[in-house]
Amino acid sequence: MGHGMHGIFVVGLTLLLRATTVGAQEQPKLNLMPMPATVQTGSGSLRIDASFSVALTGHTEPLLDRAVQRFTRQLSRQTALPFSAKASTKPTLTVHTDHASKEVQELGENESYTLSVTADGAKIEAPTPLGAMHALQTFLQLVAVSPDGFAAPAVTIQDKPRFPWRGLMIDVSRHFIPLEVLKRNLDGLEAVKMNVFHWHLSENQGFRVESKKFPKLHTLGSDGLYYSQDEIRDLIAYARDRGIRVVPEFDMPGHSTAWFVGHPELASGPGPYEIERRWGIFDPAMDPTNEKTYKFLDELVTEMTKLFPDHYFHIGGDEVNGKEWDANPKIQEFKKSHNLTSNDALQAYFSGRIQKIVTKHGKAVVGWDEVFIPGVPKDIVIQSWRGQAALAQAAAQGYHGILSNGYYLDLGWSAARHYAVDPMSGPGANLAPEQQQLILGGESCMWSEYVNPENIDSRIWPRNAAIAERLWSPQNVTDVASMHARMRAIGGELEWLGLTHRTYHPQMLRRIAGPDATPEELSALRTLADVVEPVKDYTREATAPAEPTSATPLNRLVDAVPLESDTARRFAELVDKYVSASCRDVNAAAQLRAQLSTWRDNDATLQPLTQRSFLAKEVAATSQDLSATAAVGLAALDFATKATTAPDDWKTQQLAIIDQANKPKAQLLLMPAPAIQRLVEAVGTSGSCGAAK
Amino acid sequence: MGHGMHGIFVVGLTLLLRATTVGAQEQPKLNLMPMPATVQTGSGSLRIDASFSVALTGHTEPLLDRAVQRFTRQLSRQTALPFSAKASTKPTLTVHTDHASKEVQELGENESYTLSVTADGAKIEAPTPLGAMHALQTFLQLVAVSPDGFAAPAVTIQDKPRFPWRGLMIDVSRHFIPLEVLKRNLDGLEAVKMNVFHWHLSENQGFRVESKKFPKLHTLGSDGLYYSQDEIRDLIAYARDRGIRVVPEFDMPGHSTAWFVGHPELASGPGPYEIERRWGIFDPAMDPTNEKTYKFLDELVTEMTKLFPDHYFHIGGDEVNGKEWDANPKIQEFKKSHNLTSNDALQAYFSGRIQKIVTKHGKAVVGWDEVFIPGVPKDIVIQSWRGQAALAQAAAQGYHGILSNGYYLDLGWSAARHYAVDPMSGPGANLAPEQQQLILGGESCMWSEYVNPENIDSRIWPRNAAIAERLWSPQNVTDVASMHARMRAIGGELEWLGLTHRTYHPQMLRRIAGPDATPEELSALRTLADVVEPVKDYTREATAPAEPTSATPLNRLVDAVPLESDTARRFAELVDKYVSASCRDVNAAAQLRAQLSTWRDNDATLQPLTQRSFLAKEVAATSQDLSATAAVGLAALDFATKATTAPDDWKTQQLAIIDQANKPKAQLLLMPAPAIQRLVEAVGTSGSCGAAK
């Protein structure tokens, strides 16, 4: 499998953020994400000005030249310094690379590097271009504005990844995602040192790859929204340039309705089939009993393994409900005659056949949990959407695995919740060391029911940076406050790369508000948008005003707001600090009061808008809830700061208001409500720290 | 000249925004910019949903198909409705075009159209695709969010431009502007119905066109930043698709240092020459006495007139200081022997020679004011940077002209000030009708000393929309409040086109603030940024902290803030309303007080940032000024609302504080200061309207 390196990764975090020289100067705050394995800060800093230059030494190749060009362009964007293209006799940064990476990037190649910065210059050393490129990204994150100009603090970093497989999956089938959007997200992956792009290319809702062998797959199965083979080669080269492997997924035998539009003969049902427009799990599945299916797949895999050079080839395998198999007498007959006692067994038979086809072409199979069925050959990687237990179970039986459960970006979890998910925690922690090494890492997943080119960046970023850190950094890097601070910083860096996770939000709010909205109305809408989040997990379908399909416009507030409200998170932190203190802090109270007053008064400004725009109208109740709960919070603060007790039924009444506000409306959650509830519950529990303001 | 249409444009504004049916319903507010010649609103509206479709009738051609695709994509962006690509049997919008436009778009082609919208559908009729494309842009501006979904109000529009030449000049030489940035600005020009892109391609600081005949021009004269001929053809086709002519400018005989790097033999001085890095007027000029100069220019014009198909060819001609001519004995000799008694006469000789060369290739010459010298042939268009008087003087003598004086976007004028500049006002108004027809329109100019790809959109937009309206709409469309409201709406539309005039501003502020800035600090920086403007007119060089060059980073607050502060303008409007009322309005006072309190408290939040970032540090004094003047304003309001008189020396003291704040610092003007001054001056002049709040 070529990833023997994995075992020798030793975590060394002892010197993390400790300066070797202790002086009067303030400790530099390093906005590095993912946090390197070891960081030693020094004294002084390296000034970055227009004379900045880079030199390559040791092994060189065009890929490294391009990496340096990209790095220089990005540094120029961050600083607006116009760097001259000319070589310098005394380069500011020297990059020494020992030898080439594999021609086709492989799992487990050495990605380590050292980076040292002093006031006189900076030096990168790496065995391979992969490490050198990671080091350049680290350097970009070190550069910050200072009192005297742009500078990188003196530092020595020795770094290497904890896991060799650190990926992002994007589903381009449920909503088509154009090539340039994928490219800017690959730029983002490079920035956070992820090294796998898992391209979920086929689904019930679309077959997105040009097949020259079976053109009906993409011409009839994609509404014209597919990638040409030239475009795919272009994207693979783009990824390769950034140290990113591209693993294609062709989901089989379920999740394949779009294949059957042009090739109904592959299906287990009678057909005809149309491209699926709805979301969910559907009946159509390939016929695993028909030799023609395997002949077809053999020819397709022949074509696609040539197109995609990576060693791994993902065959999906998830969520076959078996209904078409059960309804097909021929298939029932086959099961009996082959002693396949369940549909699981039938799928294992199918998986085995496909795996042979893939292996024949020199590739290894990746599949979702379902392909891990007793008897399946060991040369397979299990991608676990079911959880760490399933992953550990597979590893215990000698199977390689990667974790995706806990890393589904579309479920709307907070960054902190994703951050707490570790591939090695729970059952994985009890595995023998050689079994632990079978756990290769993980992948975040961007399923695309509710994303399109406009909002996809905001669904991936910045939260994906927290997952990237989990997969790169030592296991004991778990400080959530530090993660939040660094994630905010990298959020800005990602914008310089062209990601739109911040810039598109205001424009989507303007669409909701309409061109006639006053600045005050727009600001009120922003205030509301800043404190709501879409409903979580799998509740989006169930709470939808009408059955959502691929034609449903994604123009509502639920589509526009980030999946995590920073404002609400910081408010909750402040509340918790306030109520947990032994006495009431008047300054904290003043801060809370200012925030709550803004929220209380917000609805009055927003209401006119809700009468002019249908997109604003649907959030009118949420806006009222925000004002009502803010008023509750202010009343609670009044009691708290005066250190008086509230009337007996007061709490009951207030909690009823909060209960009402906690009910999702327009598929939105009002995020400050639980913190306000804690304010109410804390009334009468503590005294004031000093005189009330 | 092919623009005979111009004379028959009849302005008919009688029904502007008057509904034909008067009912209880609210008058729809139309965010049309430029305002059409006539608008009649009807009743009801046309619903825009996913079933929307367009049909072309009459004359059709691929250019129209592409226009409809572009229109549909843009409508989809505005609404997020996914339109199906399929043709409909009952199209929502029918576009009827009579006949083709000229193969090479000409000045004065018919650009008129009619557009009628009813609840049942919409219809466009136009003589040419140019009019049809304008109508599609008008339709896009009609579509807005409503209580029931997206809709276009019922309306009948008959429209045509006032002037046939409505352009934007972009200087791509002082800072190179990449092709994709130009393209998105061409999209903006289409949206506001401008029809000329004047491409200022050569300067002291750069020769930006690939010349296959004289490759040293671009290889030695551009730092590698030039457009290939393929790119130029691509841009011209892109412009043609949007009804925009491309007029190239090769500035001669001055403003040409970059030519001389590769071709010193063209110059009047001894050389050698280097690309100029500074701003200003420089000595190098072509040698107008050397026949080799004309041979060279003949060959270059041969090449460039083939590359640029437009009938007009701009030869610059501005700002020759004559110093190289005066210092060259050979040139002095030539002047004597040819009876050229001044450098003006020498330049007229040069202009005449160049004009003959250009005319030989079937083209007509455009030049800046300076080419209008007694004796210059009449087949020339004068672009006036000097003013309406110069323009009228030329017209009086039978010369065609376009106005640019008053339309220099780089000078930082307000939209209202540009809007008030009319090519026909002043001396132009007194011209005979046939002379007035010689005034073809105007061009806004984006000189690029202080713009780069990052901030150029914000320097052009949205103010350029006001100039576009001046050149398109009837002369009596002059309501400034209406212009501001509509300009704000079109500002949003332009963002959907990919222009970055709003989105880049926050990111530039983040660069100034640094990655460690708290949300509160960032918000305080935004509050300050919202009320400052760069110094105006030609004071940028004089007030610069160090001599600015093309290598000066454009990363300061002066580079990041819009050239016009909406916040300050609206504050001033509120102050004027407040102080001019017969008694003091308590609600207005409360609004002013809230705004002033925010400003007064802002500096305390911002100060820590000014200690961490050199880019924030330089605006520390301005931030203090904002707080100080806001405190003054609050004190003034206190006196005003209490209707008491202030102590005698109070006003003097306050006005001294404001005087201090009125001094530019870090090249920024504190825009609310004059309005606060009016508040101070109004103390004691009026009574309260009611009880103070």
Image (cartoon, coloured by chain):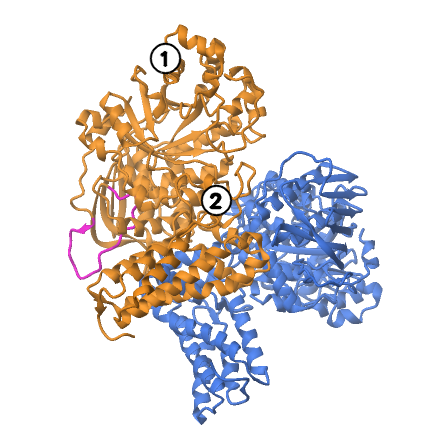
Chain colours: A blue, B orange
Amino acid at circle 2? Asn
1 and 2 marks on the same chain: yes
Image check: B396 left or right of B527? left
Foreground residue among B262 and A253: B262
Give the residue at the far bottom of this rendering: A648
Image check: B692 left or right of A541? left
Q: Earlier in the sequence, mark 1 or mark 2?
A: 1
Residue A300 lies, in percent from the top left, at 65, 45
- Where, quadrant-wise, is the C terminus of chain B in this rendering? bottom left
Badge 1 element: loop
Residue B3 lies, in percent from the top left, at 27, 25
Foreground residue among A331 and A627: A627
Foreground residue among B201 and A273: B201
Q: Is residue A626 visible?
A: yes
Per the picture, the main secondary structure of the magenta-coloured stretch is loop
Tag nearer the camera, 1 or 2: 1
Decide whether residue B503 is among the magenta residues.
Answer: no
Callout 2: chain = B
**Numbered disc total:** 2
Give the quadrant of residue A601.
bottom left
**Looking at the rendered structure, which numbered label has been put on residue B341?**
1
Image check: A18 left or right of B683? right
Tell me which segment is drawn in magenta.
B17-36
- Disc 1 crowd rating (10 Å Cα; few below 14, some 14-19, many 20+) is few
Decide whether residue B34 is among the magenta residues.
Answer: yes
Callout 1: chain = B
Amino acid at circle 1? Thr
Residue on which disc 2 sits: B455
**Looking at the rendered structure, which numbered label has been put on residue A606?**
none
- Disc 2 crowd rating (10 Å Cα; few below 14, some 14-19, many 20+) is many
Q: Is residue A273 visible?
A: no
